[in-house]
Image (cartoon, helix red, strand yellow):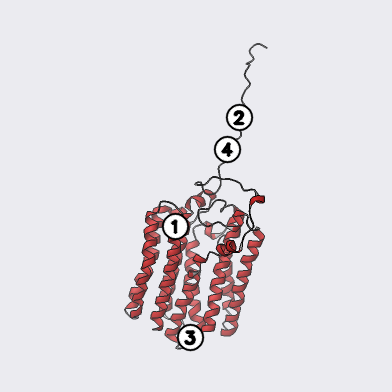
Amino acid sequence: MAGTSSKKRKRPGPKKQTARGNPQKANVPRDPRQVKPATAGDWIGAARLRTLPLAVTPVVIGSGAAMVVVDAFHWVIALFCLIVSVSLQIGVNFANDYSDGVRGTDDHRIGPERLTASKKAKPRTVLVVALAFFAISAVAGLAITIRTQQWWLIAVGLVCIAAAWFYTGGKRPYGYYGLGELFVFVFFGLVATLGTTWVQAFSLPQEAWFGAVGAGLIACAVLLANNLRDIDQDRAAGKRTLTVLIGRTATRWLFTVFVLAPFAIAIFLALFYPIAWLTLLALLAALPAILIVWTYRHPRELVVALALTSLTSLGYGAFLAWAFVG
């Protein structure tokens, strides 16, 4: 037929879909049949042991501050406080693994692989493990409540568990709206430290408040390092962490302030408790972490900064508690 081209018209190809998750990695779907089930090492890794010092520090500081008021060390209560804090921390880590995994936020990670996102474990299994650790924390907290007869602690415990879950869980998780650092400061700084002091001394001396602020600030610094590592992935996934909202440079400055401010508190306390000068030894881990945050070239380097900051927390808390006891 006249006017008909001998060439076939090319049909428009399918539209390219924007890859989800971390834009620095290719979005390569995994065949579930090729994914090996999670090993014991994978489950231990998912507990994120490098973050556990953040749960130990407030208990150590709080116990030391309690001995400023009372002479005896209530080691059984302190032990149960440690169980509450550590179990809650592990529960938060597994709950985040579950919630971020089912949302697709962790489809591509720079840091350690997650169980849910990697499909090495079923989401329901990860959720059950998270709830199990929350239950352990609740039982230990109930034991403390019965021992001290401070029944209002039950309400505090329920609020702590709710805060742990809604960090990344629920329809509107506050961790997705730049509030993660605020809640970490409140619960892993103030509540954990002051609560430990109260159940042992039924008093809240100034030492406990100073220590709680120091522990909370370092815990916030760890979260900032984590979110700085994941900033590109979080931005692409719609997770509006504080780091995403304020950008890399402001996060670096805030991280530096959060790490160094507790040492200013320790220097002030050293005027009354000379052993507190030893907290400056924790700068041996803190200063390299700050250097990494300012000079890193690849986000994976921030995993080291996170671990160093976590160790800073433990050293800071141990020396501060020693100062209070000594």
Which circle's residue, 2 or 3, is located before the other in the chain? Answer: 2
Distance from Cα at disc 1 to Cα at disc 4: 32 Å
Residue 189 drawn at (x, y percent)? 47, 71
Residue at x 36% of width, y 63% of height = 287
Residue 302, numbered label: 1
Residue 73, numbered label: 3
Circles 1 and 4 in contact, beta carbons < 8 Å: no
Estimate how packed mark 3 is, as few (under 14), some (14 to 19) or many (20 or more) residues with alpha carbons within 10 Å. some
Residue 205 drawn at (x, y percent)? 42, 81
Res 28 → quadrant: top right
What amino acid is at disc 1? Leu
What amino acid is at disc 3? Phe
Q: Quickly name the residue at label 2.
A: 12
Seen in the picture, residue 16 relative to 88 is either above or below; the reply is above
SS class, disc 1 = helix
Distance from Cα at disc 4 to Cα at disc 3: 64 Å
Viewer-nearest of labels 1 and 3?
A: 1
Farthest residue, direction top: 2
Viewer-nearest of labels 1 and 2?
A: 1
SS class, disc 4 = loop
SS class, disc 3 = loop
Which circle's residue, 1 or 3, is located before the other in the chain? Answer: 3
Residue 16, numbered label: 4
Which of the two residues, 234 or 60, is positioned nearer the viewer here? 60
Viewer-nearest of labels 1 and 4?
A: 1
Which circle's residue, 1 or 4, is located before the other in the chain? Answer: 4
Farthest residue, direction left: 271
SS class, disc 2 = loop
Circles 1 and 3 in contact, beta carbons < 8 Å: no
Estimate how packed mark 4 is, as few (under 14), some (14 to 19) or many (20 or more) residues with alpha carbons within 10 Å. few
Residue at x 60% of width, y 58% of height = 115
